[in-house]
Image (spheres, rainbow, N blue to C red):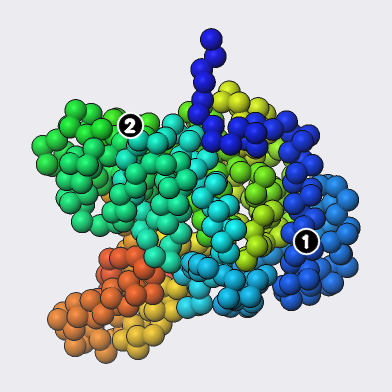
């Protein structure tokens, strides 16, 4: 007898591809009309490309429409891309930007219901149901992670413990005392929790009740998954999301662990050649592009994520017909993901150049000791600073570290080197050295 998998919305998630295509086409047309009539950015983009919403006769016509890129959102900061007046926007989230400007996402009541729905699908994919106690160690606030998982927990009827990030020893106590069965956090923090559990003299398999984990917001390997599962005694599921699209809830693994199912009735995925922008067939690696199909406040058309991956369309063993995306294998830009936070080298450069005591020569190192991302910035002192002595240099390291934390929302290690202490490049300067094993 075939294994029965838990599916939240069986009608939509197992819909035949032909029927799903009809749903997508209808919703895509509605989205195009919405953005063309309500968002000046899109009227301008469509007019410049010589296209109108009525030009979408079939899904093959999607490629006629222009892309949206992150710079479009920055240029229209903060609410220019919204398709609804601010009084109808009930919630706002944001991600940090490269030049101090955030990428702002808005949600109507309808959008919040869509978010709750797709997050319920995430939970169900791993087997979460009413009666489970969810330990939510994702950050709350402008970051979408914490609240997204919070919404989904209410939708499936589970109990949510909104712990957020930090205070690791206390988190271990809560997991044990409250009998938490589901853990949601970044994969690197899952291993931090595992270490804290072991340091407390506990055996996760015997002393805790964890059975399911949903991890995302940063790249992680199958080797890391096995380590998490072994040490925490749970089954770990990969998730994917973007604040610009909805937050977490865009896609999730099922127990087959052969890719993350995209909620295609809400988010239309494409793979394109990053150099030419031409669409690529399923099974071909390329850049991931999304169009939102049901969002009211902040709809996006053909948004270039800069993430590289592959899409698989074959029906999954779990019964879902939704396209599966593979793990992200890289990016077409220089963005780094550090402990779930998006960091651009240009942000770091802006901070470093604000200090007259530092030279413009620097290198950014990213490591993963004990499976926790470590960001290290090495920068040269000017002759004047170096002549002031060791105490002055160490004091400056503290100031730079504080400034970086305020700009990046993530901690880092700062090493100030002597003048000419950083090797000069004969060609293009190497600014970033990512030594994580991905």
Above or below: residue 353 compared with residue 436 = below
Secondary structure of residue under mark 2: loop
| Residue 121 image offset from top left, x and y in percent | 52, 40
Binning the other alpha carbons within 10 Å of mark 2 as few (below 14), some (14 to 19) or many (20 upward) gives many
| Residue 147 image offset from top left, x and y in percent | 42, 57
Circle 2 sits on which residue? 211
Residue at x 77% of width, y 61% of height:
32
Secondary structure of residue under mark 1: helix
Instruction: Kindly indicate whether the residue at mark 2 contacts the one at mark 1 (C-beta within 8 angstroms).
Output: no
Hey, which quadrant is residue 38 in on the image? bottom right
Binning the other alpha carbons within 10 Å of mark 1 as few (below 14), some (14 to 19) or many (20 upward) gives many
Let me know if residue 420 appears in the view: no
Does residue 193 appear to the left or right of 217 in the view shown? left
Does residue 196 appear to the left or right of 335 in the view shown? left
Res. 32 mark: 1
Residue at x 23% of width, y 76% of height:
398
| Residue 127 image offset from top left, x and y in percent | 44, 31
Res. 116 mark: none
Residue at x 38% of width, y 41% of height:
158
| Residue 244 image offset from top left, x and y in percent | 57, 61
In the rendered image, which quarter contains the C terminus? top left
């Amino acid at each position: 007898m075939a294994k029965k998998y838990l599916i939240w919305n069986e009608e939509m998630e197992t819909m035949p591809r032909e029927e799903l295509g009809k749903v997508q086409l209808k919703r895509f047309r509605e989205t195009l009309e919405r953005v063309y009539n309500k968002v000046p950015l899109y009227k301008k983009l469509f007019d410049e490309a010589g296209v109108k919403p009525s030009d979408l006769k079939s899904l093959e016509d999607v490629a006629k429409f222009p892309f949206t890129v992150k710079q479009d959102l920055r240029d229209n900061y903060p609410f220019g891309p919204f398709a609804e007046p601010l009084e109808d926007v009930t919630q706002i989230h944001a991600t940090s930007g490269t030049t101090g400007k955030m990428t702002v996402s808005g949600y109507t009541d309808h959008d919040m219901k869509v978010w709750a729905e797709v997050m319920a699908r995430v939970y169900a994919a791993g087997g979460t149901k009413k009666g489970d106690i969810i330990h939510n160690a994702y950050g709350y606030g402008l970051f979408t992670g914490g609240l997204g998982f919070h919404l989904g927990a209410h939708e499936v009827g589970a109990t949510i413990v909104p712990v957020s990030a930090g205070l690791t020893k206390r988190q271990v106590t809560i997991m044990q005392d409250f009998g938490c069965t589901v853990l949601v956090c970044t994969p690197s923090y899952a291993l931090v929790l595992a270490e804290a559990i072991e340091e407390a003299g506990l055996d996760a398999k015997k002393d805790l009740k964890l059975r399911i984990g949903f991890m995302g917001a940063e790249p992680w390997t199958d080797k890391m998954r096995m380590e998490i599962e072994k040490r925490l005694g749970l089954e770990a599921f990969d998730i994917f999301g973007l604040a610009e699209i909805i937050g977490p809830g865009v896609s999730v693994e099922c127990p087959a662990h052969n890719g993350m199912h995209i909620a295609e009735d809400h988010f239309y995925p494409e793979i394109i050649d990053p150099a030419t922008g031409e669409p690529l067939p399923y099974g071909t690696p390329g850049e991931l592009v999304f169009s939102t199909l049901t969002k009211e406040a902040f709809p996006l058309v053909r948004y270039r994520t800069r993430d590289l991956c592959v899409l698989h369309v074959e029906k999954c063993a779990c019964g879902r017909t939704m396209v599966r995306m593979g793990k992200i294998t890289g990016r077409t830009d220089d963005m780094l993901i550090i402990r779930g936070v998006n960091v651009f080298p240009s942000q770091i450069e802006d901070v470093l150049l604000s200090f007259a005591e530092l030279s413009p020569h620097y290198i950014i190192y990213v490591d993963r000791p004990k499976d926790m991302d470590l960001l290290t910035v090495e920068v040269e002192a000017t002759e004047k600073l170096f002549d002031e002595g060791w105490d002055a240099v160490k004091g400056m390291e503290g100031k730079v570290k504080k400034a970086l934390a305020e700009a990046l929302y993530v901690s880092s290690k700062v090493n100030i080197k002597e003048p000419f202490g950083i090797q000069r490049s004969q060609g293009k300067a190497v600014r970033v050295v990512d030594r994580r094993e991905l």
